[in-house]
C-alpha cells in the first residue's frame, strides 16, 4: 500500500559567534570540492607546465652529476641548450592536455625520441608522467588511451636502446608510466559514474514530480466533471422552479413566493458547489481520454456496500460500520467520500497482500463526516510485516492515489491522513464537513 503519507554580530557572546561561524561552513547539501584545476583550468595548466619544466630541468641536471658532486646552479648551466629547448617544448604541450591529451602525449613521446637520439641522458621522464596521467584522465576513447599507454612503454624502452646513457628498469617504468595512467583512468571513471548517478537521480525526480502533477491534474479534472454534474442538477431545479413561479405568479402569489424560496435555496447550494468546481478547473481545457464517469448518476455512500462486496470477492475479510447519514447529504461530500473509499480499496488490492483484513467505518461526528479504513499488510508468503508499507512507497505507482484523495478532502475544507500503523496495519482517515462553506 502506498505511504503518504547568519549575520555577523561583533558584540555577540563568544558561543554565539562560534555558532554563526560554524553555520557558515555547514553547506547543507554535499557538493564536489572545486580546486584551482577546476576553477581556472587554463591558468592552472599553464602553471603546471612551468612547474613540470623546472622539475624536469632539475631532474636532468641531478642525473648528470657525478658521484660526490654537489647540485647547484652550475649543474643546471652545464646542460646543453638543446635540452632546455626540448624540455620546454614538451612541457608547453601540457597546456593543451585537457582538450587534446592523445596529441599532447604523442608530442612528448616524439620529444623523448629526439632526446634519445641527441644523447642528452636520463631524468627527463617527469613530463611523460603528467602526460600519461592526462591521457587516462581526459581521453574519451578507451582504445586510444590504451594505445597511447602502450606507445609510452615502447618509446621508453626504445630510448634506452638508442641512448646507452639512459638507465631504465622494467618495474620502475611500469610504475612511473602505468600507475599515473591508471590513477587518471580511475578518477575519470568515477567522475563519469557519479555524473551518471546524478543525471539519473535528477531525471527520476523530475519524472516523479511530473507524474505527481499529472495525477493531481487528472484527479482535479474528474472532480471538475463530477461537481459540474452536481451544479447542473441544482441549476436545473432552479430553472424549473423559476418557470413555475412565473407561470402562477398572477394567479397564486403565495405559491409563487414559495417556489422562489426554493429557487433561492437551490441557488445557495449551487454557489457552494460551484466554488469547488472553480477551484479545480483545468488550465489547459483538455478533456481526458476516459469519459466513463460521465455516464449514469454519480455514486455516493449508498453504493459503498457494493464496493465492500467487490473487495470481499478478492479474498479480503471486510467489516463495514456504516452509521445513519442525513437523507440529503451534500452531493459533493457524498461523492468525495465514495471516491476516497474506492481509492483506498484499490490500494488494498494492489499493495496489502493476500487475504487482508479490512475495517471500514463511516460515521457522523457532529458536523463532520468521519471515514476510517484500516487493513493488514502481509508479504507474498503470508507473514505479516510492518515494512511492506514503507517498501510500497518506492513503487512507481505509489503515493498518487493518496494525493488524489487528499486533494478531494482539502477542496471540501476537510483533511485526510494515511500511513502505516505498527506493527502490521495501514490506516486512512478522512474528515469531511457535512456542509462545506458556500462562501
Image (cartoon, helix red, strand yellow):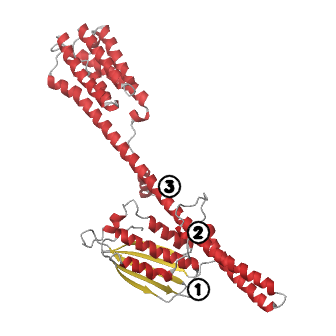
Q: Determine crowd level at label 3: few under 14, some 14-19, many 20+ residues with C-alpha closer than 10 A.
A: few
Q: State the separation of the CA atoms marked 1 and 2.
A: 21 Å
- The residue at which mark 1 appears reads as 328
Nearest to the eye among marks 3 and 2: give it. 2
| Image coords of residue 71 (percent x, y) | 23, 16
Q: State the separation of the CA atoms marked 3 and 2.
A: 63 Å
- The residue at which mark 3 appears reads as 11
Is residue 250 among the parts visible in the rendering? yes
Q: State the separation of the CA atoms marked 1 and 3.
A: 68 Å
> Mark 1: which secondary structure?
loop
- At a point 34% along the width and 77% down the height, the residue shown is 316
Q: Earlier in the sequence, mark 1 or mark 3?
A: 3
Q: Is residue 214 above or below residue 149?
A: below
Quadrant of the image for the C terminus? bottom right
In this rendering, would 50 be left or right of 115? right
Q: Is residue 15 above or below residue 176?
A: below
- At a point 56% along the width and 82% down the height, the residue shown is 434
Q: Are marks 1 and 3 in contact (CB under 8 Å)?
A: no
| Image coords of residue 85 (percent x, y) | 34, 11
Q: Earlier in the sequence, mark 3 or mark 2?
A: 3
Q: Is residue 156 above or below residue 243?
A: above
Residue 225, numbered circle: 2
Q: Could you say which is closer to the camera, residue 225 or residue 243? A: 243
Amino acid at each position: 500500500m502506498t505511504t503518504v503519507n547568519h549575520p555577523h554580530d561583533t558584540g555577540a557572546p563568544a558561543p554565539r559567534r562560534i555558532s554563526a561561524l560554524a553555520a557558515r561552513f555547514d553547506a547543507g547539501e554535499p557538493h564536489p570540492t572545486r580546486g584551482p584545476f577546476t576553477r581556472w583550468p587554463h591558468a592552472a595548466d599553464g602553471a603546471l607546465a612551468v612547474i613540470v619544466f623546472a622539475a624536469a630541468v632539475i631532474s636532468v641536471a641531478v642525473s648528470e652529476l657525478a658521484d660526490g658532486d654537489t647540485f647547484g646552479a652550475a649543474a643546471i648551466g652545464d646542460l646543453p641548450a638543446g635540452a632546455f629547448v626540448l624540455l620546454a617544448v614538451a612541457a608547453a604541450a601540457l597546456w593543451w592536455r585537457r582538450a587534446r591529451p592523445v596529441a599532447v602525449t604523442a608530442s612528448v613521446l616524439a620529444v623523448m625520441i629526439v632526446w634519445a637520439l641527441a644523447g642528452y641522458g636520463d631524468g627527463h621522464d617527469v613530463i611523460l608522467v603528467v602526460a600519461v596521467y592526462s591521457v587516462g584522465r581526459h581521453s574519451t576513447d578507451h582504445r586510444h588511451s590504451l594505445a597511447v599507454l602502450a606507445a609510452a612503454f615502447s618509446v621508453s624502452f626504445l630510448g634506452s636502446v638508442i641512448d646507452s646513457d639512459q638507465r631504465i628498469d622494467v618495474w620502475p617504468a611500469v610504475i612511473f608510466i602505468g600507475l599515473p595512467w591508471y590513477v587518471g583512468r580511475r578518477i575519470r571513471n568515477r567522475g563519469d559514474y557519479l555524473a551518471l548517478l546524478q543525471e539519473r537521480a535528477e531525471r527520476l525526480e523530475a519524472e516523479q514530480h511530473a507524474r505527481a502533477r499529472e495525477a493531481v491534474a487528472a484527479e482535479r479534472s474528474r472532480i471538475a466533471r463530477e461537481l459540474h454534474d452536481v451544479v447542473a442538477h441544482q441549476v436545473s431545479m432552479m430553472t424549473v422552479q423559476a418557470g413555475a413561479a412565473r407561470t402562477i405568479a398572477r394567479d397564486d402569489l403565495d405559491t409563487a413566493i414559495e417556489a422562489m424560496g426554493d429557487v433561492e435555496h437551490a441557488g445557495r447550494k449551487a454557489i457552494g458547489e460551484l466554488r469547488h468546481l472553480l477551484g479545480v478547473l483545468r488550465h489547459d481545457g483538455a478533456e481526458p481520454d476516459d469519459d466513463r464517469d460521465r455516464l449514469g448518476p454519480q455514486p455516493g455512500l449508498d453504493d459503498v456496500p457494493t464496493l465492500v462486496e467487490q473487495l470481499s470477492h478478492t479474498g479480503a475479510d471486510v467489516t463495514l460500520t456504516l452509521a445513519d447519514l442525513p437523507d440529503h447529504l451534500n452531493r459533493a461530500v457524498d461523492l468525495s467520500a465514495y471516491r476516497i473509499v474506492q481509492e483506498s480499496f484499490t490500494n488494498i488490492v494492489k499493495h496489502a497482500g493476500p487475504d487482508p483484513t479490512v475495517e471500514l467505518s463511516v460515521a457522523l461526528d457532529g458536523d463532520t463526516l468521519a471515514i476510517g479504513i484500516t487493513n493488514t499488510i502481509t508479504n507474498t508468503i503470508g507473514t505479516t510485516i510492518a515494512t511492506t508499507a514503507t517498501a510500497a512507497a518506492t513503487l512507481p505507482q505509489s503515493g498518487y492515489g493518496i494525493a488524489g484523495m487528499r486533494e478531494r478532502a482539502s477542496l471540501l475544507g476537510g483533511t485526510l491522513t494515511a500511513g502505516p500503523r505498527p506493527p502490521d496495519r495501514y490506516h486512512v482517515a478522512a474528515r469531511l464537513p457535512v456542509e462545506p462553506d458556500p462562501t
